[in-house]
Image (tube, grey):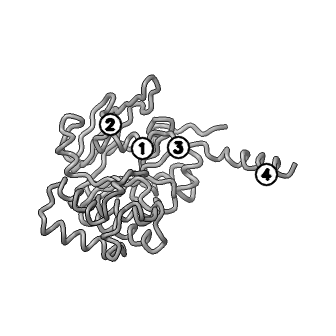
Amino acid sequence: MRHRPTGGLLSETHHPDAVVTVEGLTFSYASRQVLHGISFTLGRGEVVGLLGPNGAGKSTTIKVLTGILPPGGGSVRVAGFSLPGEAVQAKKRIGYVPEAAALFDSLTAQEFLELMGRLQEVPEPTLQSRIDLFLKHFDLAEERRRRLDGYSKGMRQKVLLSAALLHNPNLLMLDEPLSGLDVNTGLMVRDLVAALAAEGKTILYSSHVLDVVERVCDRALIIHEGRLIADRSLESLKASTERGSLEDVFRQLTHAEETVSDVTEIIEGLRS
């Protein structure tokens, strides 16, 4: 029998210092409804995982929160500003690393970061200092004058992470931020996420790599078929579902346990 999640897995707490407040958010592409009235808050200093199967609505949610897409219904407030009406003000407080970004390949890393920083009105001396800082620690200093079309996927990801942090935003939206990164850089980014949260930054971290989410996040939002089915601390989710890991919780709530039979059929098919 399939497990049907109940409202018991949804948080009833409201953050008095909420940085993000989402109430009854809906969104549709043409005639297909993607988000069905989801509600949650993100508090100052929290690292919250945004989880769900492909097509569940994670990227759409992030695009609404970053002002890329207007909400279809409901209300969204980010850093005290209402979307979409005050999206410009909200974007100044947001750092965003998309899952797949199109960079200006004709620019060098130095030029791209200067452009991003100036769009965010970072004072020039501060901007140059921060560019030097990020390029140094991401091992890109010697590549700063090289065009981005010559960068590997991991190098491009480092540039995106740098661009998201240049203006020292209050809120970070990270969609598969470790994609393409080597192990050492991935570990540094994980430590950086924790340090930024300790500085009071709010971080929404979307990823399919659940063991990493379990290490860096305090809490998880799980979306399934456009509905928020869980919003709890990781320990509370594991206790409520009597599962030992976030991966096991995810499998149970999104019916991914059924993949075992799929794997069995594939193996039998290969044997025949």
Q: Nearer the viewer, residue 173 or 98?
A: 98
The quadrant holding residue 74 is top left
Dot 4 or dot 3: first in sequence order is 3
Q: Cβ–Cβ below 8 Å for labels 1 and 4?
A: no
Amino acid at circle 1: Ser
Pointer 4 residue: 267
Q: Cβ–Cβ below 8 Å for labels 2 and 4?
A: no
Dot 2 or dot 4: first in sequence order is 2
Q: Is the N terminus in the top left, top right, bottom left or bottom right quadrant?
A: top right
- The alpha-carbon separation of the residues under discs 4 and 3 comes to 23 Å
Pointer 2 residue: 69
| Nearer mark to the viewer, of 2 and 3 | 2
Pointer 3 residue: 54
- Within 10 Å of disc 1 (Cα), the crowding (few <14, some 14-19, many 20+) is some
Q: Residue at x 32, y 45 (%)?
A: 13
Pointer 1 residue: 59
Amino acid at circle 3: Asn
